[in-house]
Amino acid sequence: MGSNLSVNYIEVIAMILFVTGFANLLLQKNLIKKIIGFNIMDSSIYLFLAVKGYITGRTVPIVVDGVTSVEAYINPIPAGLVLTGIVVSVSVSALMLSLTIRLYRRYRTLNLDEISTRLKREGM
Amino acid sequence: MDMVRNIPFFSIMLAMFSGPVCSVLPGRIARAVNAAVITLIMGMSAVLLHVLNIRGESFVYMMGHFPAPWGNEIRAGVLEAGMAMFFCMVMLLSVLGGIKKLFDEVVESKHNLYYVLVGLMLSSLLALVYTNDLFTAYVFVEINTISACGLIMIRENGRTIEAAVRYMVMSLIGSAMILLGICMLYDITGHLLMSNIRESVIEMTSGGAYPEPLLFTIALMSVGLAIKCALFPFHAWLPDAYGYSTVSSAAILSSLVSKGYIFLLIKIIYRIIGFNIYGDSGVIDVLFIFGLAGMIFGSVSAIRENDIRRMIAYSSVAQIGYIFMGIGMGTQFGMVAAIFHMLSHASTKSLLFISAIGLTDVSDGSRKFEPLTGSAYRNRVAGVAFAVGALSMVGVPLFSGFVSKLLFAEAAVSLTGRMLPALIVLGISTILNAIYFMKTVIRIYTPVENDRYPVVSMKEVPLYSVVLVAFIVLNVLLGVMSDPIVELIRKGLDMFS
């Protein structure tokens, strides 16, 4: 275990980014920072997937010079998955941002804990 | 190619497109169309269930032109068809039961948007039930999250928006973990279709390849789904989300949304990882322990609560704990009990939420226990319905909760190492359930003199009363006719593997 870390250094970076984003999403009080954390977390997964889907020396699976050997190309599915994932995370980010705007208009703060204590004080 | 094979695909599509169509129709017609579509899907699923049950087989439906290892697939067996039918039933009753309250609480321009959310929610639930492709499952998990967020905050006030944000944060963490798990599984197996992954996993475990990545994948997907269904200790968002959203949303969220994720987890256990490999992985022990903890802590929080809606919400935490305990037992009996409890909890919890709203409405809208005293005399049908729901949750014979508790106990007895903790916690949790539900039932049936609140008769709220009676019938049916249902569940689980 651990001997492949230097070879697969991009995967290591992806995991570090994942944990960074995860911690930010969970622990930050500021809503915008939470959303940034979420985006870092999701992007790191796409980095992981993209890097896993690439094989050094091969090219995109579009036949140009009549080369039909499987050995010449990479699998296009990981790239497709990354694109799908990006669409999902963009829409979720938009939803989170709209929620943030609504909360800010009501309470004039982005601090989620402060909003919670204020709601408890209002007692509704 | 016979016609019934098209049913799963058309159920998903009908549910998805009914929403946008309803949103441009005038109010009453939109309501009728929405109810008709859900009923139609329910009927189609019933036909599918009947046909598959007679033939005793499951089938795979190819989406598009590419065959197995590349294309996308839908798979349907007895369990899937039955779940789809049941989800539609509970969805229809929950929407109809809370529709009047929804119109009171939500601004008029948003009334029709509710049908969009309901359609989206139903289609994502059906897709989670039917899909045979792991990445499609992930996409529909996200669609489910987004529509659930909309359902929470359609009634807009500070509390619901805050609850929606907290819900989103937990859900996003859960779905990111699921996505990472799926990506890793794809990397080590090279497949996204469940049956192909299963073959690779068997090959890998027998050859001893990639033991750590496989374990990590199992852990990521299980914990991600557990976070999304609010297993203790990830339940912090739940009481606010269930307690302050409009009543239909609370019923749908508590009875259906978490069930969709649990069903996906069961599919992952059976159809991707394999029951034996999952049972040996150690992740199952974690689910078992947190299930037991949830059963106790959810009930304790419910006892301490002084708000009827939040009390029912905390009770959900305990019931999700029951289901995870069943999954965590690692036997076929435990799994059957868990699936039956999914049905039982779905029918009971939505009944409780919808009847509670009838009780609070005749008490000046107050949800605290003091003004609720005697409210069962002011709205009789809601009182009876709440009592039925409470008795079912406690586990009194005749009602569905009794059967699921019995199945859990039977499953626990057949275990070797975990029998004692399971039985003890089951007993303690039943007593705790009885404390807070019986306390509430006694309070609503305590007569008060000089009642200053209005009395609502059944004739004034016909639709609401019909819905509650239907829920009671459903609950008693599950309780009385449990044998054929358990048999169906067993048959469906056999079809999985």
Image (cartoon, rainbow, N blue to C red):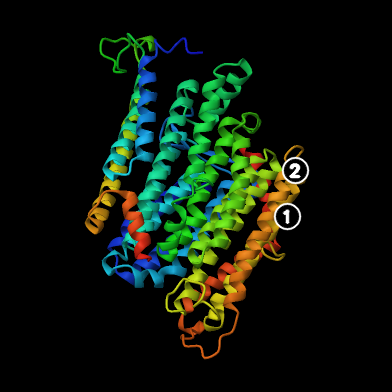
Chain identity of mark 2? B
Q: Within the image, what quadrant is residue B109 found in? A: bottom left
Q: Is residue B215 visible?
A: yes
* Residue for badge 2: B419
Quarter of the image where the C terminus of chain B is located: top right
Instruction: Name the amino acid type tagged 2.
Output: Met
* Residue for badge 1: B406
The residue located at (40%, 57%) in the rendering is: B118
Q: Position of residue B228 (x, y in %)?
A: 47, 45
Q: Position of residue A106 (x, y in %)?
A: 24, 59
Question: With respect to residue B330, does B451 lie above or below?
Answer: below
Q: Position of residue B346 (x, y in %)?
A: 55, 57
Gap in angstroms between the C-alphas marked 2 and 1: 14 Å
Question: With respect to residue B309, does B490 lie above or below?
Answer: above
User: Toward the viewer: B281 or B418?
Assistant: B418
The residue located at (33%, 40%) in the rendering is: A28
Badge 2 element: helix
Chain identity of mark 1? B
User: Toward the viewer: B440 or B138?
Assistant: B440
Question: With respect to residue B283, does B20 lie above or below?
Answer: below
Q: Residues within 10 Å of mark 2 (few under 14, many from 20)?
A: some
